[in-house]
Amino acid sequence: MNRKILVTSALPYSNGLIHIGHLAGAYLPADIYVRYQRMAGNDVVFICGADEHGVPITIAAMKQGKTPQELVDYYYKINRDSFEKIGIKFDNFSRTSLPLHHKTSQEFFLALHEKGKLKVKEIKQLYCPEDKMYLADRYVNGICPKCGAEDARGDQCEKCGSWLDPLSLKKPKCAICGAEPIVKTTKHWYLPMADFQPDLEKWLKQKNWKDNVMNYCNGWFKEGLRDRAITRDLDWGVPVPLPDAEGKVMYVWFDAPIGYISATKEWAEKIGQPDLWKDYWQNPDCELIHFIGKDNIVFHAIFWPATLMEVGGYNLPTQIPANEFLNLEGNKLSTSKNYAVWLPDYLEKFSPDILRYALAANLPENKDTDFSWKQFQKCNNNELADILGNFINRTLTFVNKYCDGTIPPAESLSELDKNVLNEIAKLAAEAGELINSFKIRAATAKVMDIARAANRYFDAAQPWKTRKNDFETCQTTLNVCCRIIRTLAICFNPFIPFSSDKIWTMMGFEGNSTDGHWDDAAKEIDPAGTKLGKTEIIFKKIDDEELQPEIDRLEKIVADMEQENAVPEGIALLPQITFDEFGKTDLRVAEILTAEAVPKTKKLLKLSLKLGTEKKQVVAGIAEFYKPEELPGKKVILVANLAPAKLRGIESQGMILAANSPTGLVLVTVEKDVPTGSKVS
RNA sequence: GGCGGCGUAGCUCAGUUGGUUAGAGCAGCGGAAUCAUAAUCCGAAGGUCGUAAGUUCAAGUCUUACCGCCGCUACCA
């Protein structure tokens, strides 16, 4: 009996392009899985769409002088196009700005409201009178109440790392226009997650999901779930369908996953069976599989199931194969720094299948993995071209040269022939099972093993010899090789669909490579008599010169980032002081006489300083950067009238100045020799 | 601070419930072959599995501490 499976990939947020990290996390594994399941004869619907609401989109639009709709229209088209070109074949790539989605989301909201599942709370929030909007935490800047840094964001101060309440910021400013926001009281609807926790825990406990997903969830449960606001004061989003909710929309994380449902509805409408979506969402026999990146786990494994559970009548996720992150050339991807490989750029230069294969072979299934252009090149040159491509090429060259371009017959199969056919049948079945259990990386290696086995067979059978002394055996060998190529085309289809189809056509087979069912991939279908199509090299080698610009571009960004970090960013200055205020600081040149480490500390050195005729004892936190023995004799600048303090029980009678460089502290010293005790001003 | 993860051959990564000489691919080394996109195939070599203890007849696999990296979390500072 065939399975019915609804597969979703995380909805990409429509304020940017798709990059390899997105692909590796949620899209490519899903696409491979879907293609396999279809070939295995299962009924699969593959759903995705653009997530088009939320504050970042309104802000990005404002900055670009566009309306939010114009912005999401732009990214919708370009991302939909990217997916298509890379071969991610959704049944429907919808968008959350559609009326159908608004309607569906509102139905969800109302259902929760009417069942009395939602809480209403009044809170105080900052409001920008210029932009006429409530400011989300990260869109407020101000002075950090904890450390006094100037550029603290409403949610967190990057200087001292404290998490902040935006209302506690001193001198708050709107991050968009710079105006001073005012405090207003507003009302929001909340999902009382604590109430839902027991049911959720019970449900999740029976799941046998990947460790990373379970660990995340258990962490959240342990902390105890908290109420979560699902509304926002914004004019961009799904309006809250209640009379007393004027100007409020749903929080983007509430409406986005509902997008899976509205996208399925849209799909059903498009194919002319508007009720068919129910068969995938309300039929308990249908499996629901969400492919996501690890950043989405909490939403898909906790908030979303809770919503579905409380609304009732919908299937809950069967499986959430969340992937870890993909790094790039050893560094984290950064969209803001443009440190990524963007799909539209990639597609201009290379063919989609190479990236698909290179990523599939190195998916971050268990932990973060690294993508490098060198690895990409190796995947293409050493595997796709040398192992797979070359096997096909060496076989077809024979068929073309000595068999008139027609696949020759196999009179009788030898042990060698039978063994290799058995072997590839076994490998094909194993690869399928691996995909079915979401081990796509291992599956990738497995299908390449089919090509390795094929090359081994070719070498053992030595058709270049049998051609001369035993043409019938030679023909049999080639016949077997062509069967293997058919298997290869089928088994590689989920990974490199474009090339698979190319191989299929080249072999002169009818239809395309998905027509062969996976279970029949290695069946003894004798292709003898088939006239080959036009043969060509399928995977060309990529040389270093083609990759160098890509590598250079990324290296430059890394270098720039390092430089940026080197200069204190933004040079946010402390509040102005007067000359008189400065005059209170008594800075003096002093010479270090002795220095010794303070026991049981990492950073502290006890220094004794000569200041004219006086001596001062200072404890300085420079031990990580200076050894005691290299200090005596150095002339440094001392804040001489600083109130004494005790550090680790040792009195410190001042402090010496040092510059904070990215590589550590550097002592400030005098440019020419001067007597100790000289005043610095 | 708390929680979680990671640290395995030169590189990228596997290692299922603890069980025999720790795996794969790539690079490097040796060889075979010459049909093919100088591609293929075979072989050997390569690791005190982050460090240090512990549990066990037996630990990469469990426990504890520590080091390094990462993530989440928190109305310490």
Image (tube, coloured by chain):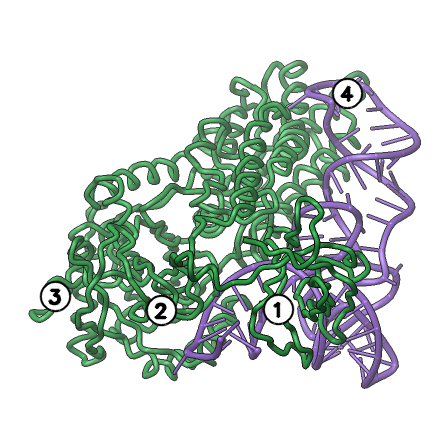
Q: CA distance from mark 4 to mark 3?
A: 75 Å
Residue linked to disc 1: A654
Q: Colour of chain B?
A: purple
Sequence order check, earlier mark of 1 and 4: 4
Q: Chain of mark 1?
A: A
Q: Secondary structure at mark 2?
A: loop
Q: Residue at x 31, y 49 (%)?
A: A49
Indicate the position of residue A515 as horizontal and vertical percent values.
45, 38
Residue linked to disc 3: A241
Q: CA distance from mark 2 to mark 1?
A: 64 Å
Say few, some or many: other residues with alpha carbon within 10 Å of mark 4 (under 14 / 14 to 19 / 20 or more).
few
Q: Are marks 1 and 3 in contact (CB under 8 Å)?
A: no
Q: Amino acid at mark 3?
A: Pro
Q: Nearer the viewer, residue A313 or A472?
A: A313
Q: Amino acid at mark 2?
A: Leu
Indicate the position of residue A116 as horizontal and vertical percent values.
19, 81
Q: Are marks 2 and 4 in contact (CB under 8 Å)?
A: no
